Amino acid sequence: MKMKKILQIIAAVVLTFSATESKAQLADGSIAPDWTFTDIAGATHNLYTYLNAGKTVYIDVSATWCGPCWAYHNSGNLENLYNTYGPSGTNELMVFYIEGDGATTLSDLQGLTTGTQGDWVTGTPYPIINPSSAATTTFNSNYAIGYFPTIYMVCPDRSITEVGQSSTATLYAAKSACSIATAPVDAEMMLSTSLNPSLASCDSVTPTFRIGNVGTTTLTSATITLKVDGVTQKTFTWTGSLATYANTTFTGVKVGSSVAGSHTISCVVSNPNGSADPTSSNNTATASFIIYPTTGGALAVQSFEASGMPTSWAISNGGDAATWANATAGYLSSKSITLNWFNIPSGDVDIVTLDPMSFTSGTGHTMTFDVAYRQYSSENDNLKVEVSTNCGTTWSVVYNKSGATLKTLPASTTSFTPAASTDWRNETVSLASYSGQSNVLVRFKGTSAYGNNLYVDNINVSAAAGVEENNLVNNVTVYPNPASNNASVDFNLTSDNNVSIVLVNTVGQLIMSENLGNMNTGIHTYQMDASSLSNGLYFLNITVGNNTITKKVAINK
């Protein structure tokens, strides 16, 4: 069984983390905050001092009671890295152990108590830092520590990467991605994914990029070129004053496209201080953006059974490799979409946006969907449904549930996959205030708290019945629902009229059709034979005159 837990930083409670959990919460490319600590031998260390000297810094954030931390500590990978490439080796990097539990004592580190895995000090050549409780809280917050061990690599330009519990060779190889100041003038475009998490509009977007100085002299100017799908759209001159390894962000320049869909912005830096840039490999950073159609289309009816999540739906990845994806489990079916919060770091935000819809026909629009979720323990993983009518410029929250409110089952410490219809709950979201709008965007926004997995199925947007339809028939009910072999359909006709019933599956295929002919005013019951139907979700369409009412019917034998 995979063991993992959210690190309660403030409470400083004793928790256990898995050696297989290898994702940190600071997105790769983020800027590492500076720190100054004194190690247990009395020596003081400042992160940026090492970085300014051109050294790459590796940080092992562990806890003395953590079993996987102890196993990796004893693997010797960080020890070998330090001995070979540290101060007594080639002197190109530093390694630090930073204790992540503020309650840990020196005796714990020395293996003299029952609350430790062993002696962490003897034989460890690199500095061991045991901050005060308050300093540990600040450090864990600044570095968004969500589990132990977390192994970070910080490049001289301050950019951070989570390198995980890797071999010495892999750790050292990761260092090759770092830019080192050797030439007098050298500008770089730094990883900017986390700066542009959800760029989207109907015409243009304004991205943010980070420029850094990896030259040995001050950077004061550079040429910036913005390309969309490889075609140059904007060129301008950046000016400022960046010391060696300093960086800054810039924004405010719009780029766009007239073609709906996903696009890539490339930001290229050149001519630092009016000179040729000596290193082309660090001159480009990219970001993705989405252009939405200016006019909405059909209302969403999606069960994912045909071919999974539509490729036209726009996904915004919060930084971790995992994001909204197709799942092999659904509500009375084998397909849905999922967020793997069991592994996605806390704070990571992932968004999937449905195709634009027109709400110009009908009134009282609503959206229904099925959801399945359970916590790992008491985490507040969050799901929102948001709506925009201005091409994504602003969004309004119409559904917001977290943790205990969102869950459909009790907490579980194993990775969750729904296995029964009772694992799911049907949700109804009113979109009535958007009726009449010609271009409505709806998106599902998931924010991880490093809990357990979320599943969403059967997303259906519809308009309420019109006045005429309500005047013809009312009180339509299907029971039992879910049904097994038979289901009863009750309806009340307000006047004599022709009635027909059609049953379709979630991909629109006709399952059964029956014309009941002209029926008298009053209450009627139609018996539907479901004995030959497979388990799953169906739509029952009752047509009275020229109007149709649709009801969902679940078959579960």
Image (cartoon, rainbow, N blue to C red):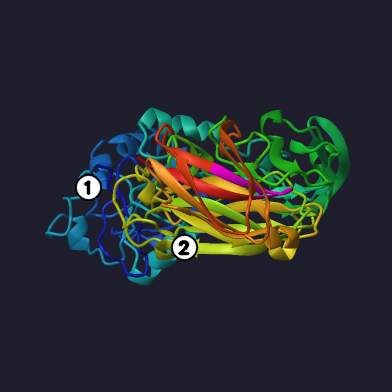
Please tell me whether residue 132 is drawn above or below residue 316 in the rendered image: below
Q: Quadrant of the N terminus?
A: top left
Q: Nearer the viewer, mark 2 or mark 1?
A: 2
* Residue at the (19%, 59%) spot, across then down: 108
Q: Provide residue 65's location: percent of width, then percent of height.
A: 22, 55
Say whether residue 267 is visible: no
Classed neighbour count for the residue bearing mark 1: other residues with Cα under 10 Å, few (<14), some (14–19), many (≥20): many
Magenta stretch containing residue 544, yes or no?
yes
Q: Which residue is mark 1?
A: 67
Q: Main secondary structure of the magenta part?
A: strand
Q: Nearer the viewer, residue 134 or 12?
A: 12
Above-or-below relation of 151 to 11? above
Residue located beneath label 2 in the image: 402
Instruction: Give the spatial CA distance, label 2 vs label 1.
Output: 31 Å
Is residue 84 visible in the rendered structure shown here?
yes
Res 79 → quadrant: top left
Front position in the image: 380 or 491: 491
Q: Secondary structure at mark 2?
A: strand
Q: Residue at x 39, y 64 (%)?
A: 404
The answer to whether mark 2 and mark 1 are in CB contact below 8 A is: no
User: Residue 4's spot in the image, x, y percent?
Assistant: 31, 50
Instruction: Residue at 69% x, 30% y: name it.
Output: 279
Residues shaded magenta: 539-548
Quadrant position of the C terminus in the picture = top left
Q: Residues within 10 Å of mark 2 (few under 14, many from 20)?
A: some
Q: Look at the image and say whether residue 409 sits in the magenta stretch.
A: no
